[in-house]
Amino acid sequence: MVVVLELGALALLLTIAFGLFCLLRERGGINGFLAILLFGTTGVGMILILSEAMDLVGLKDVALAIALLAGILGVVLALRCWPGEMGE
């Protein structure tokens, strides 16, 4: 079971690496913010998988903190970049 969880974490790490490659290839304002949100949510998933694999309960608290920060970043993204009344 631990091997399956570690392979899942490796798959998520490869997803982050591919996203970073695409981000560095095509730079842009909104794409950068969305990539940061993607890295945050993928990182939370990876930390949760590793916390189960290594049986460390404290990593779940770290994942929760990162998820809360990613949520705040999503609100900031919507307020700054969304056309309409909110961003004006």
Image: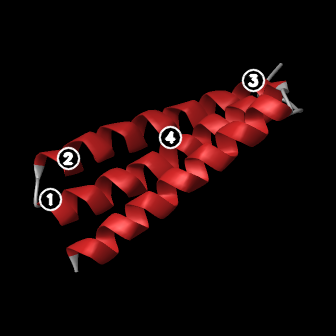
- Looking at the image, residue 59 sits to the left or right of residue 35; the answer is left
Image depth: mark 2 or mark 4 in front: 2
> Of the residues under marks 1 and 4, which one precedes in the sequence?
1
Count residues near mark 2 (Cα–Cα under 10 Å), then give few for <14, some for 14-19, many for 20+: some
The residue sitting at 83% across, 19% down in the picture is 88
Question: Looking at the picture, which amino acid does disc 4 mark?
Answer: Gly
> Of the residues under marks 2 and 3, which one precedes in the sequence?
2
Cα gap from disc 1 to disc 4, whole angstroms: 26 Å
Label 1: which secondary element: helix
Residue behind mark 4? 71
Residue 1, percent across and down? 22, 80
Cα gap from disc 1 to disc 3, whole angstroms: 39 Å
> Of the residues under marks 1 and 2, which one precedes in the sequence?
1
> Of the residues under marks 1 and 3, which one precedes in the sequence?
1
Point out which mark residue 80 bears.
3
Q: Nearer the viewer, residue 57 or 5?
A: 5
Residue lying farthest top? Answer: 88
Question: Looking at the picture, which amino acid does disc 3 mark?
Answer: Arg
Point out which mark residue 54 bears.
1
Question: Dividing the picture into quarters, in which one does residue 52 lie?
Answer: bottom left
The residue sitting at 30% across, 46% down in the picture is 64
Cα gap from disc 3 to disc 4, whole angstroms: 14 Å
Cα gap from disc 1 to disc 2, whole angstroms: 10 Å
Residue behind mark 2? 59
Callout 1 touching callout 2 (CB < 8 Å): yes
The residue sitting at 84% across, 29% down in the picture is 85
Image depth: mark 2 or mark 3 in front: 2
